């Protein structure tokens, strides 16, 4: 799994990426600081879970992905076979390209993890 998140940091403007279980535990990370990875992992699972509950409740279905914009960058979340793929980017990044690469990574995760 580590090689999948490592491939994502090759995209221009991507600062880091991680794979997180629904429980918030980090499976793989490219972030240098383990504490940052743990905090981001817990936040990713909590935010994804709450947004997913809300989208179901209001009748628009399960959450596919989410983008959190901040002053200096973004955090992108995407579900991949019961894990959450999280990518942190700089402000000036091609979000479409990042989302496309995340979908490719999710497909690879799906192939690596049996049903």
Image (cartoon, rainbow, N blue to C red):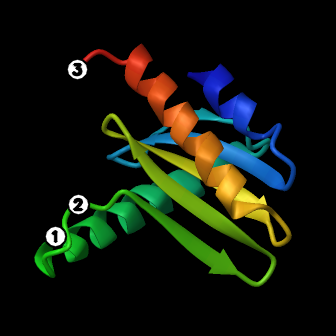
Q: Residue at x 81, y 77 (%)?
A: 72
111 displayed left or right of 88: left
Which label sits on residue 114? none
57 displayed left or right of 108: left
Q: Earlier in the sequence, mark 1 or mark 3?
A: 1
Q: Name the residue tied to disc 1.
A: 56
67 displayed left or right of 78: right
Which label sits on residue 115? 3
Where, quadrant-wise, is the N terminus in this rendering? top right
Q: Earlier in the sequence, mark 2 or mark 3?
A: 2
Q: Where residue 44 appears, x then y in whole percent?
A: 47, 59
Q: Where residue 5 appears, x then y in whole percent?
A: 65, 33
The number of callouts visible is 3
- Whether 114 is drawn above or below 4: the answer is above
Where, quadrant-wise, is the C terminus in this rendering? top left
Q: CA distance from mark 2 to mark 3?
A: 19 Å
The reply to whether residue 27 is in sight is: no
Q: Residue at x 58, y 43 (%)?
A: 102
Q: CA distance from mark 1 to mark 2?
A: 6 Å
Q: Where residue 54 appears, x then y in whole percent?
A: 22, 76
Q: Earlier in the sequence, mark 1 or mark 2?
A: 1
Q: Are marks 2 and 3 in contact (CB under 8 Å)?
A: no
Q: Helix, strand, or loop for circle 2?
A: loop
Q: Helix, strand, or loop for circle 3?
A: loop
Q: Nearer the viewer, residue 75 or 22?
A: 75
27 displayed left or right of 87: left
Q: Are marks 1 and 3 in contact (CB under 8 Å)?
A: no
Q: Name the residue tied to disc 2.
A: 62
Mark 2 crowdedness (10 Å alpha carbons): few <14, some 14-19, many ≥20: few
Q: CA distance from mark 1 to mark 3?
A: 23 Å
Q: Are marks 1 and 2 in contact (CB under 8 Å)?
A: yes
- Whether 73 is drawn above or below 16: the answer is below
């Amino acid at each position: 799994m580590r090689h999948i998140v490592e491939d994502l940091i090759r995209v221009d403007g991507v600062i880091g990426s991680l794979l997180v279980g629904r429980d918030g535990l980090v499976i793989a990370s490219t972030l240098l600081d383990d504490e940052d990875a743990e905090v981001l992992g817990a936040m990713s699972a909590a935010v994804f879970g709450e947004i997913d509950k809300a989208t179901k409740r209001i009748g628009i279905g399960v959450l596919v992905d989410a983008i959190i914009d901040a002053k200096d960058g973004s955090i992108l979340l995407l579900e991949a076979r019961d894990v959450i793929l999280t990518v942190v980017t700089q402000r000036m990044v091609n979000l479409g390209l990042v989302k496309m690469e995340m979908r490719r990574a999710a497909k690879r995760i799906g192939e690596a993890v049996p049903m």
